[in-house]
């Protein structure tokens, strides 16, 4: 018996309009969705070409949910996206060439080659770079919300986490603090059913992670993470609730991690039928079909968007490959911040 | 100038900064209604309200992590650990998130964590530790260890103002025992600059925190022997003032490094190793370390006394060096 | 709305017999209860006499609950009692003189003067010494249960924690692991309504800590902690359930911390009426009255038991004061264990 | 004897001990079905069942804390961290509970924590660290850092057998790169005994883990200059073999301490300080340290290469010492 509310799928264009997206917005969302998948697919190719050092992770299957939540955020809202949330970076406006530069350890990546993978963020866009340690960014997201509360600003923080990482103490402490102080934060659980090779029933003993929300004094919602519009609606609702002083919400977005944990992992432990079943619910395909059926997206429109995305990606790859590797003379710079560093948009 | 205890000087520094800068807020267990376990924030909630003096849940990871988030959003959080020992529960947030964010992502994390530390009153293994060495090893963190009321105030203001995560170790055994004149206005004491607590010519003691007073008493003893002892109070363990340390080492050619934390792998090793490496030709004796033995801090008074370096231990070490 | 089950008070002697205690047992329980309070009252006097270094904590108000849970444990069960659980040490058979020796930092205390207060335990009696860090012993208790499960032993571990400490990650991780693996562990929350000066609503956002149990896949029970027999019944039930393979239970025993956090704290922040109200439910007085009304405890019996307890305490104080302070030559001994140390009852 | 990689030797040691001693069990993230992130426990769950090879929740505090409880109940738990870096999430359980329980309460805590550590493959700031120095400072913990397949097996068995909490740092960069003959039977290599990796007369290198090979290549280079380098592989950083170190220091009179962890407050400081204190009269040059600079471990190959001490850096350091 789930304690959390199970969200309905989204139906008509009208419903979506009510939730705040007009047709133009929807085509933008589609573009971001394509771009998100494209960035990761191209990244994968780069990896196979030996151009990406270290390992390589993607959020395949989670593109819709990550794009949806980011689309629901307000311009001054902030968030701490994780390794399956490329869509958040894309929607907030990180330039794809900088993501490729990041992947390849180049000087123009957001971390200037100091960190790899999706361990990056552009603070100017309201994002905070994740650390590997999961889910250590949740207390940080709660701290952002605390700052908003102290200053009485109508801003919201979003903290992402995986269903596996929900087992860690950081998750509990973050939700506890957010709950007792009714802070404007939305917790988004990317429940892709596997934590590396570990299935959910070894990570938590309830049916849903969102069933826990009540234990922290706020609402839990389970939503189909392949249904972009349903995720958008729930995220929007939760964000506006938080903005209005209604406190935190825990949204659990259920998907399947459609690839291995990282590029080296063939996911032999995931039953084949599971992949087959979830492949039928590809979030991109699902949203595309919805747009054609409900928003009359035409062949021309579709082609134009794909064309634009392809061009962005091609240009981005080229520009990223032109970015130099970091100069070793920079190695020891900036371990400590200087007073001038505080002159960022957030610190004002 | 008013005469303040070390504890009052900390309160004073914190209050000064909170009055001056609206971005500064305090969060910790029992810091609000109760005024903190040691009453450093007594009366603060009345003055600043309960959103700037926040009684946190018993959750150190949430406290430090939330400070990090708030700092990135432009606040200047000051977290209080009820005892320094409990910072072990926020170790990951400090070393993984706060310490590395500036280097990796360019995001400064200006937080201050106040840590009532040190032994001397039968606090036992979990209310007496001096964990500064562990943090001083982590690139990205700063560690401040004031010894005097004046430094306590000035260094706290510097810590809050500093754009980095700063651990501010306040020694509990100095709280009410040490009193001195403290300027009433706002002032800062720079991080990374040592202070000559006492000038001397024959032997140098490098130390910080409560051990400054132990060293001073020992130096007094040595006066009778005609040995002149210089005491360098590091004030901040990270960054530490290598220039001042090497200068004093070169002047006296004999150095004792003294700390209350346990010996092996303690920060004294870094200081001794650096002196050995950079002032090798100037040394007339091996750099000697005096520190607590490698055990947890014992509770029972005779054990604790044997554990914490005492004046006589230091005096004996100084005599040995003087005679070398 | 509480999700946890609220336990009924205990009524008749018959009911108690069914729960496993005969009249003899009940008089023993009474003796242990008197002894528990006596140890702490005498400790308090010692403190005021300047004979106890450092600080001093008591579990006043929690004596009944701690005695009850310990009484419900089987001889091979183990536990990690905390600073309000003196009754556990007393019931398991720690000699009171050793407790006084511990308080005073003497060589014959269970920690030989190395630690103070209730930071002690006798491993031979199935107890593990607490650390200050709360609630770091919960994962340890779960580990005991894990060992029992691996070895297929019918033993149960009990982990105590305060309602304040329930905010920490250790609590969450311990319960998560116990829940997914259905380990034989019973979590006992001493909810005395205050964590130092912090009231519960700033520690957790539900009505009861036990409301969280469901989030970990097991049952939560709220019981009046001043009702020794009700706590006993619920603890017994939970322990036997765990023993039978039914997995963990979270029992929340509600009391009021009847003194300050520690001896230096006058608890000014606790409303006076709260103390007055709870003083009417003193667990000792309540159990004594019950014994007189339901088990015909006579004046003679009562006097005899008080006499025995008084003598134990007097002798204990005397013996403890004769115990020497630890020799400083022992300071650096035993930081590391030797192979022979493993020759304890538990390690076989 | 069979030729095994360093990684296979670890598996072999663990399997050997699990076959011999029913009390030994393994717990960690993905150690069961998946065989661990590095496949050290591949096939273990089939052989030992899922109650002796336990796929844990993503919860390092629970993993280490549960090991402590199980150990006190007589088991011999072996925890695997997926990467050494994640041990920061169990810091409190190790330093507060496991490390101090024997001293305080007389209760031994025989647990082993396996920590795949070290850099060299663009793992970035959170998959490359060498956190042994932090733990070596905590009384009650032991730290093992094998360099060879033979030691990897023998030291792992010793760690499991040891009645204390032992952190076993296995260097990921050696996993598949280093192969050697390893005895098939069970054997132990004692904790606290260094190994002379290479004998020499002119300069000593004290090091451990992957740096042993870096030192060896540098020593090779120095042969051309007619400088004979002795390499002491510490094998265990806590306890560390002071006797062997001082002996070699006295023999060559010139010492280089080398480690992959960052410099300031790294364990090299302890070694250098001790040599400076106890072999002062025997030294013909300052004890030199070479270590990573004080930054997080950078991801991009050129930065990482500049961060981790390289053969040429070590060779240059040795030349400098030889010429002193
Ligand atoms: C504290 C911590 N321990 C271990 C890891 C190693 N690790 C990386 S991802 C992962 C699985 C995460 O699962 P989940 O939270 O479900 O996120 P997903 O990768 O499935 O999106 C693990 C164990 C980590 N990153 N952090
Ligand atoms: C991790 C940690 N942080 C802080 C403390 C300091 N401290 C000691 S007791 C206490 C309050 C505990 O409250 P609760 O868990 O309700 O237990 P109670 O003392 O009320 O029985 C605090 C904050 C501690 N012991 N451990
Ligand atoms: Mg997952
Ligand atoms: Mg309480």
Image: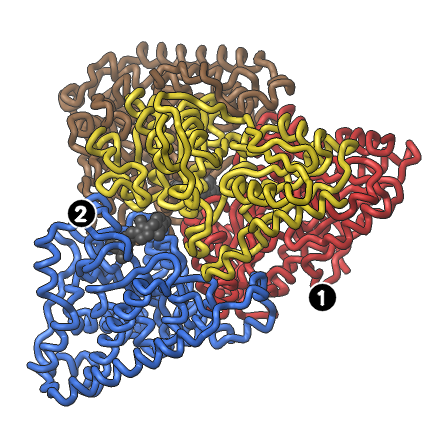
Chain colours: A brown, B yellow, C blue, D red
Q: Tell which tag, 2 or 1, sits nearer the viewer.
A: 2
Left or right relative to C285: residue A190: right
Instruction: Estimate the x, y position of residue B84 in percent, counting from the top left.
Output: 42, 44
Q: Residue at x 56, y 29 (%)?
A: B194
* Residues at discs 2 and 1 in contact (Cβ within 8 Å): no
User: Which residue, given by chain and number where applicable, does mark 1 sit on?
Assistant: D185
Q: Is mark 1 within 8 Å of ligand 1?
A: no
Left or right position of A283 against D233 = left
Q: Position of residue A97 (x, y in %)?
A: 48, 15
Vertically, is A263 above or below C313? above
Q: Residue furthest left?
A: C293
**Where does label 2 land, which residue?**
C269
Percent position (x, y) of residue A134? 42, 39
Asked whether, in this view, residue C215 is left or right of residue B194, the answer is: left
A309 vs D22, nearest the viewer = D22
Which residue appears at 54% of the width and 34% of the height?
B237
Subunit ID for the residue under disc 2: C
Quarter of the image where one finds residue C260:
bottom left
Residue placed furthest toward the right: D226
């Amino acid at each position: 018996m789930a304690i959390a509310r199970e969200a309905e799928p989204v139906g008509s264009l009208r419903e979506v309009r009510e939730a705040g997206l007009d047709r133009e917005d929807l085509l933008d969302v589609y573009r971001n969705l394509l771009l998100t998948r494209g960035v990761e697919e191209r990244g994968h190719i780069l990896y196979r070409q030996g151009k990406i050092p270290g390992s390589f992770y993607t959020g395949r299957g989670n593109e819709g949910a990550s794009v949806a939540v980011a689309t629901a955020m307000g311009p001054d809202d902030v968030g701490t996206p994780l390794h399956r949330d490329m869509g958040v970076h894309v929607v907030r406006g990180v330039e794809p060439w900088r993501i490729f530069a990041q992947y390849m350890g180049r000087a123009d990546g957001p971390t200037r080659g100091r960190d790899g993978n999706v361990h990056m963020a552009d603070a100017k866009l309201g994002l905070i770079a994740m650390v590997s340690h999961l889910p250590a960014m949740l207390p940080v997201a709660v701290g952002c919300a605390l700052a908003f509360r102290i200053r009485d600003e109508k801003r919201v923080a979003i903290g992402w986490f995986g269903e596996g990482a929900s087992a860690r103490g950081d998750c509990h402490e973050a939700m506890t603090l957010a709950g007792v102080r009714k802070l404007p934060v939305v917790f988004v659980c990317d429940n892709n059913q596997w934590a590396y090779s570990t299935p959910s029933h070894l990570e938590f003993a309830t049916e849903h992670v969102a069933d826990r929300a009540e234990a922290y004094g706020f609402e839990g919602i389970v939503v189909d993470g392949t249904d972009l519009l349903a995720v958008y609606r729930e995220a929007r609702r939760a964000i506006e609730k938080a903005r209005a002083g209604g406190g935190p919400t825990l949204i659990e977005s259920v998907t399947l991690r459609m690839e291995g944990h990282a590029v080296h992992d063939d996911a032999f432990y995931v039953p084949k039928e599971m992949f087959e079943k979830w492949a039928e619910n590809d979030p991109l395909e699902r949203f595309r079909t919805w747009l054609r059926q409900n928003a009359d997206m035409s062949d021309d429109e579709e082609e134009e968007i794909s064309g634009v995305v392809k061009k962005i990606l091609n240009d981005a790859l080229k520009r990223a490959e032109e970015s130099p590797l970091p100069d070793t003379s920079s190695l020891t710079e900036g371990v400590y911040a200087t007073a001038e560093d505080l002159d960022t948009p957030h610190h004002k | 100038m008013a005469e303040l205890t070390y504890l009052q000087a900390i309160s004073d520094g914190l209050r000064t900064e909170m009055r001056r800068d609206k971005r500064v807020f305090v969060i910790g267990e029992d810091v609000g209604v109760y005024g903190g376990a040691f009453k450093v924030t007594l009366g603060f909630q009345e003055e600043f309200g309960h959103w700037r003096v926040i009684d946190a849940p018993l959750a150190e990871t949430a406290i430090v992590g939330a400070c990090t988030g708030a700092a990135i959003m432009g606040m200047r959080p000051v977290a209080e650990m009820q005892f320094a020992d409990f910072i072990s529960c926020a170790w990951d947030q400090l070393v993984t998130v706060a310490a590395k964010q500036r280097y990796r992502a360019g995001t400064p994390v200006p937080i201050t964590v106040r840590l009532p530390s040190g032994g001397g009153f039968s606090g036992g293994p979990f209310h007496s530790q001096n964990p500064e060495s562990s943090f001083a090893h982590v690139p990205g963190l700063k560690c401040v260890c004031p010894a005097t009321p004046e430094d306590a105030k000035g260094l706290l203001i510097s810590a809050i103002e500093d754009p980095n995560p700063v651990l501010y170790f306040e020694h509990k055994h100095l709280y009410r025992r040490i009193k001195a004149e403290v300027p009433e206005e706002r002032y800062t004491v720079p991080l990374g600059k040592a202070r000559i607590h006492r000038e001397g010519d024959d032997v140098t003691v490098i130390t910080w925190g409560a051990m400054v007073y132990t060293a001073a008493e020992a130096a007094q003893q040595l006066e009778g022997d005609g040995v002149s002892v210089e005491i360098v109070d590091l004030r901040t363990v990270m960054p530490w003032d290598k220039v001042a340390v090497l200068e004093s080492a070169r002047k006296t050619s004999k150095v004792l490094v003294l700390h209350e934390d346990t010996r092996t792998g303690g920060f004294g090793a870094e200081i001794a190793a650096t002196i050995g490496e950079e002032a090798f030709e100037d040394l007339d004796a091996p750099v000697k370390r005096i520190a607590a033995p490698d055990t947890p801090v014992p509770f029972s008074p005779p054990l604790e006394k044997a554990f914490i370096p005492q004046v006589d231990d230091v005096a004996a070490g100084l005599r040995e060096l003087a005679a070398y």
